[in-house]
Image (cartoon, grey):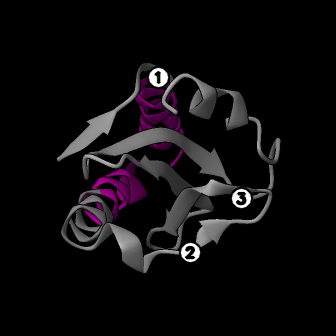
């Protein structure tokens, strides 16, 4: 099971609005790649790399987009997506979100 945390949902909406406005041709591919990556995370959450700077978090890049799905895998097996983070902006800004989950 995957749970999208509130802040991650807001980031996803913001990214979707940006693509819809600036690159409508890419918006559908973006969301298709996103869904596929979320499916892969759900099927095999341990197969993605841990994030340098916080061993509790893992991340998965999807498609050709400069974003990563940052998630925490709970002991229960539930995947908590904490961020849809841009590769080059505000590194590790989402770390505080992990405190709420662990």
Image disc number at residue 30: none
Residue 16 lies in magenta, yes or no? yes
Disc 2/disc 1 C-alpha distance (Å): 24 Å
Q: Residue at x 24, y 57 (%)?
A: 35
User: Mark 3 vs mark 1: which is more N-terminal?
Assistant: 1
Residue 42 percent across, percent down from the top left: 22, 61
Image disc number at residue 49: 2
Q: Secondary structure at mark 2?
A: loop
Badge 1 density bin: few <14, some 14–19, many ≥20, Cα 10 Å: some
User: Mark 2 vs mark 1: which is more N-terminal?
Assistant: 1
Q: Can you tell which of label 2 and label 1 is closer to the viewer?
A: 2
For residue 71, side relative to residue 96 (left or right) = left
Disc 3/disc 1 C-alpha distance (Å): 17 Å
Foreground residue among 58 and 101: 101
Q: Residue at x 81, y 48 (%)?
A: 91
Marks 2 and 3 close (CB-CB < 8 Å) = no
Which residue lies under the disc numbered 3? 87
Q: Secondary structure at mark 1?
A: helix
Foreground residue among 7 and 78: 78
Q: Is residue 16 above or below residue 69?
A: above
In this picture, which residue range is highlighted in magenta?
Answer: 8-34
Which residue lies under the disc numbered 1? 10
């Amino acid at each position: 099971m995957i749970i999208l945390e509130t802040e991650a949902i807001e980031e996803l909406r913001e990214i979707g609005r940006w693509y819809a406005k600036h690159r409508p041709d890419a918006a559908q591919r973006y969301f298709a790649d996103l869904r596929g990556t979320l499916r892969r995370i759900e099927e095999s959450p341990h197969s993605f790399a841990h994030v340098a700077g916080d061993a509790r978090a893992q991340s998965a890049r999807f498609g050709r987009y400069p974003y990563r799905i940052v998630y925490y895998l709970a002991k229960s097996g539930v995947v908590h997506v904490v961020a849809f983070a841009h590769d080059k902006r505000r590194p590790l800004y989402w770390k505080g979100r992990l405190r709420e989950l662990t």
